[in-house]
Each structure stands twice: as C-alpha cells, then as structure tokens.
Image (cartoon, helix red, strand yellow):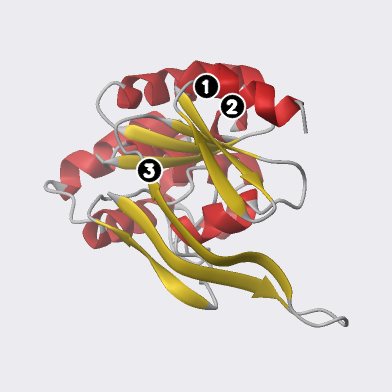
C-alpha cells in the first residue's frame, strides 16, 4: 500500500504560493509497475521526490507499508569523504542488509570500479559515482524501486547490465518510474498515472495512459 492523504504541495513565488497539488488523495496500485506521466511542470518530479522522502508536502502525508528504494539514479546517502567501501557498508547498515560482507562483495563486483572502491568517493568521476549508487541500490531487495532514468548510467555495456538487473528485479518487485523515454517506460511498466491539473489519473492499461499523455 502506498497512500496519499490530503496532500498539499506548493512552492513560493513573487506572486504567492504556486500549488502543485492541493488536498490530493490517491492510492498507488502496488501489484503493477507504474509510469508517472505528465507534461513539463505537471508535478512528476515533485511527486517522485516526495515518494522518495527527499522532499516533503506542506501538509498531508504519504503512508506505505512497503520498502522503497531511493531513486536509483540519484546519489542519495553517498558521502564524498568516505570510500566506496565505507559508503557501501553505511548504506547496507541503514537498510538492514542481512550479510554486510556479501552485500559489499556484490556491490564491488557490480559497480566495476576496481581498486577505486577503496578511495574516497570525491575522487570518482560522475559516471563512477553513478555506478556505485546503482550497485548499492540494486543489490538490496526492496518491495518498490523508484526509477529515474536509471538505464542512462555509465557506458553502453554498463547500461545493458543495469537494464538487465532491473528486469530481474521487476519479476518480484514493483517499480515506479519517471522517464522521458517511452520505450523505457514500455519496457518496465504495465500501467500509468497521468498528472493533470494537480490530479492523478490511473490507467491500468499502459498504452491507454500513454495515449492520454500524448493527447495533452
């Protein structure tokens, strides 16, 4: 269950508060992988950040009994002064990974950053950091994965690897995806939520949702 209750979200402006959502109520289906669709400025990224708890509503709340990942393409929780290994251990501990040594090994192998795993993350390129973040996320078993352009991480070989890992997770876990790539959405999602005028409209059929989005 992921339930939005009486949620209001606004941003300040010279003209006063600009409301993205006002007294919003909605329950996400958790038995489908869902794409969040909407034109620019509709509130896709705002909703996504609130689901990820990296941003909070003015009032109201989001309730869930599911474990949710952080956005897999976002370097959340990574400390630049710490090494890749230290960051991995830290993330493993706060997510209550059962075997830290096994998790550490899986992340190191998946990230493909070699000896730099034991160097401070501040010395990494943006691509290396993104690989580490993705590896840390995909090697934890969440109920729901928050996907934001995740398959654009790294070089073409790593992108294929990331896509295959997400496909495997999608067999047993749900996904909530924000992407501008409709091909990527079709690859991972079976349904859609279209944001229009601060309201969320659910389409159990993905293609119907895409058609409504394209017709805006």
Q: Nearer the viewer, residue 133 or 63?
A: 63
Q: Residue at x 76, y 52 (%)?
A: 41
Q: Would you place residue 112 above or below residue 4 in this image?
A: above
Tell me the residue that label 3 is attached to.
137
Residue that label 2 marks: 209
At a point 37% along the width and 48% down the height, the residue shown is: 69
Q: Is residue 216 found left or right of 26 in the rendered image? A: right
Total of numbered circles in the picture? 3
| Visible residue check, residue 181 | no
Quadrant location, the C terminus? top right
One can see residue 105 in this view: yes
Give the distance between the C-alpha atoms of the residues marked 3 and 2, in whole angstroms: 28 Å
Residue 50 location (% of width, % of height) = 50, 61
Q: Residues within 10 Å of mark 1 (few under 14, many from 20)?
A: many
Q: Position of residue 155 (x, y in %)?
A: 62, 24
The image shows residue 137 at horizontal and vertical percentages of 37, 43
Q: Secondary structure at mark 1?
A: helix
Picture layout, residue 68 above or below residue 154: below
Q: Could you tell whether 58 is left or right of 40 in the image?
A: left
In this rendering, which labeled residue sits more in front, label 3 or label 2? 2
Q: Secondary structure at mark 2?
A: helix
Q: Nearer the viewer, residue 11 or 100?
A: 11
Q: N-terminal of the two: label 3 or label 2? A: 3
Front tag of 3 and 1: 1
Task: Identify residue for label 1.
Answer: 206
Marks 1,2: beta carbons within 8 A: yes
CA–CA distance between discs 1 and 2?
A: 5 Å
């Amino acid at each position: 269950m992921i339930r939005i209750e009486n949620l209001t979200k606004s941003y300040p402006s010279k003209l006063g508060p600009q409301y993205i959502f006002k007294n919003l109520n909605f329950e996400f289906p958790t038995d489908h992988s869902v794409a969040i669709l909407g034109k620019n400025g509709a509130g896709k990224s705002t909703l996504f950040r609130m689901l990820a708890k990296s941003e909070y509503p003015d009032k109201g709340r989001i309730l869930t009994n599911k474990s949710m990942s952080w956005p897999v393409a976002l370097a959340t929780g990574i400390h630049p002064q710490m090494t890749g290994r230290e960051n991995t251990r830290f993330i493993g501990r706060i997510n209550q990974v059962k075997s830290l040594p096994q998790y550490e090994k899986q992340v190191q192998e998946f990230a493909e950053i070699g000896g730099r795993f034991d160097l401070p993350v501040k010395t990494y390129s943006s691509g290396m950091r993104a690989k580490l973040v993705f590896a840390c996320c995909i090697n934890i078993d969440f109920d729901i994965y928050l996907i934001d352009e995740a398959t654009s991480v790294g070089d073409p070989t790593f992108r294929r690897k990331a896509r295959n890992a997400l496909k495997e997770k999608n067999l047993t876990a749900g996904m909530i995806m924000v992407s501008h790539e409709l091909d990527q959405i079709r690859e991972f999602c079976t349904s859609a939520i279209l944001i229009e005028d601060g309201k969320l409209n659910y389409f159990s059929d993905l293609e119907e949702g895409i058609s409504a989005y394209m017709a805006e």
